[in-house]
Every structure is written in C-alpha cells, then in structure tokens.
Image: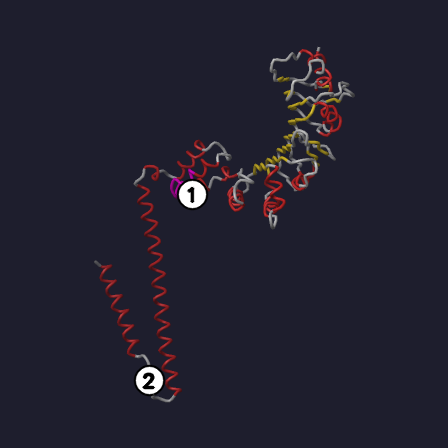
Amino acid sequence: MPFRQAKAAFLTALLDRHQSLSTRAPAAPCWPRRAVRAQVDEFISSLGELEDELDNVQRDIQRVRNSLSQQKAVALTSLQPIGMLLPEIIREIVPHTVEGPSAHRQIMRLSQVSKPWRDVVLGISALFTEARWGIWPFALVELWCSRAGPRLLNIRVTGAFLLRMASAPGRPYQELLKKHAVQMGILEFSCYGARDPNTSGLLDLRMPSLQCLIIRGFTGSPVSACIRFENMPKLRRLGLLMTTPEIPAPLTNVTSLHYGNYAHALQRDMLQIFPKLPRLRHLSLELLVESGTPTSPGPRNVLQSLISLEVRWGTSPDSTLLPSLSPLNLSSLPNLQTIVLHDDGREFTALFQSLV
C-alpha cells in the first residue's frame, strides 16, 4: 500500500509539473523580440530540467529492475537441486567430472549448467591450459588462453595449421603465440618437409618456461630444426620424430628423449645429437629399417647418465642386421638399469650381445 500511494503521488506531481510548464509555453510573438527570446529560453531551460529529472528516475528504475531480475533468477535456480550447491562444493565436483584440460566438451557443458556453475568453471584456470589451435576460431583460442591466467600452456599444432597460419592476414596467430611464449609449458608441432619456414619461426620464440618440446616430421620428409638452449633453458623432455635437429649448445636440463627415425640415422645422431644431451637419463627409440641399411656400427658413443632404454621397431629388421643396428652396440651404457623391448615375436637375443 505505501508503494502504491507513493507511486500515485509521484505521478500526480509529475503531471502537475508538466501542466504548469504547458501553461507557461510562449504564445505568438506580440512583445518585443528581446522579451520573447528571454521567455523562450526560460521555458526551454525548465523543460531541460524536467527531462534530466526523468532520466535520473529512469536510471533508478532500471537499476531496481536489474536487481529484481537477478533475484528472480536466483530464486528460480534455488528450486533446482543442482542450483542449491555452494560454489565451494561445485569447485570440488568439477575436477572429478572433467578429464583434464583436453576435455573441452565436458568443460563447456559444465559451464552451461547454470550461472553459479559457469562462474566456478571459468574461475578454474587449470581447465583452460590447452586450446584447440587450428580447429577453433581465433577469438575462441584467444579467450581460452586468457582464462588460463598465469598457468603454463600446452600448445599442440599440426603442419596444416602452420601453413594456414603463415598466410593468415595480419598474422594474428603469430602474435598470439608470441604473447603467450613465456607461458608455454609444452610445445608440440609437426611440419611438412625440411624447408618448412614455420619451424624456425616457432623455435625462435623465447620460451623460458618450456619443459617439453616435441617435433614431428614425416616418413620420407624429415624436418630440420634448430634448438637453442637460450630460448628454452628449462627444457627437460625432448621428442624428435623424423627430425634432424641442429643443437648449437648442450641442452643441459634435458633428461628424457623420445627419438624416432631410420636406424641408419641413429648411427649418425648417436655422435651428433646425443653428446649435446649430457644429462640424458631416459631414452625411448622408434626405429625404421630401410633396405640396404649399412651394417657397420661405426664409433661408439658413451651415454654416461642413461639409466633406462626403450626400443620399438617400426619395421621388421632382418635378424642378421639387429646387432649392428642395436643401440646397445652403437653406444656404451655403463649405468643402464632398465631395458624395455617391444617384442612382436622376433628373436631379440642378438640385441643383448654387448651385455653378455
């Protein structure tokens, strides 16, 4: 009742004010021009004051309307059991529902349950460390990365995306990668051919937090890449798949290497790449054998720090070639503790000749 009485009083006062102004409207000019102008100016000023007051009232009404809408939404949500959960409880539920930052659909679905759920999900920065580069629109990739806050990012891109990225007007993806280079924790990319210009473009970025780097080439089309210690001083895990790297200075923090290439390339890289990894402790090999692969093992390299070795053959080598192609015979492993051989039925006795 008091509200309705106040509303009626307000409308009555407003109409009275309007009626008062209407009676003061200037009539047809019958006075001297100067007097008429003064009267009109005063009337316009009065109208302006009334308009300002109405604007203020409208803003106040809109604020009340917005508050009512929010209260109504909260009330409706409270009728649903899921809407009654406290943010602290939602924050505990989400990690058990989402299978890591790569479960993009799960993250998006949870953020659409309700507004409280959306606020909580968007506030968990760990869920947004892995955008789908090359699949999502640029705006979504940029937004996803921004929601990760200061957390390290996992960036995985394909060769097709790198080629498309190079031709994009304005180079937006290059600028975004440059912006987040200090946050890169994992960088994995594939390239088409040794002359791919995008390889050096990515590896020239200063990535002080990078811990894992994986470079993928293709059979018959290996990738050339220059890996500089000063650009990634914290690098610990390195993946070189069909890749011929140039390593100017030793990567002193790398302890794990996943190497995939032809067996004859391993003979070369044992002398050129492996000495640049003085603290290598874990080595995983995927080897392919070409016909006519040379069987002379050549000089042996000493991997002093290596404690575990894993070997997988991508093609079936002739058993007579196994001794010369075996990493056990291409190198000296004085501190080796663990060997894993992925046996598909072949006889691996020859691989252990250097251990007997």
Which residue, given by chain and number where applicable, does mark 2 sit on? 28
Q: Quadrant of residue 353?
A: top right
Q: Is residue 163 at all visible to an observer of this figure? A: yes
How many residues crowd around disc 2 within 10 Å: few (fewer than 14), some, or many (20 or more)? few
- Which badge, 2 or 1, is on the more N-terminal residue? 2
The structure's colour scheme is: secondary structure
Q: Quadrant of the C terminus?
A: top right
Residue 277: image quadrant is top right
Main SS type for the magenta part?
Answer: helix
Residue 252 in view (yes/no)? no
How packed is label 1: few (under 14 Cα within 10 Å), some, or many (20 or more)? few
101 part of magenta stretch: no
Q: Nearer the viewer, residue 168 or 130?
A: 168
Callout in the foreground (2, 1) = 2
Which residue is at a point 66% across and 20% down the rendered structure image? 307
Q: Where, quadrant-wise, is the N terminus in this rendering?
A: bottom left
Q: Residue at x 26, y 72 (%)?
A: 16
- Could you tell me which secondary element the residue under label 2 belongs to? loop
**Residue for point 37% across, 80% down:** 40
The segment highlighted magenta reads: 109-118
Q: Residue furthest front?
A: 291
Amino acid type of the residue tagged 2 in the rendering: Ala
- Examine the structure image and report whether residue 115 is included in the region drawn in magenta: yes
Residue 94 is situated, as x and y percent measured from the top left of the image, at: 43, 35
Mark number displayed over residue 119: 1
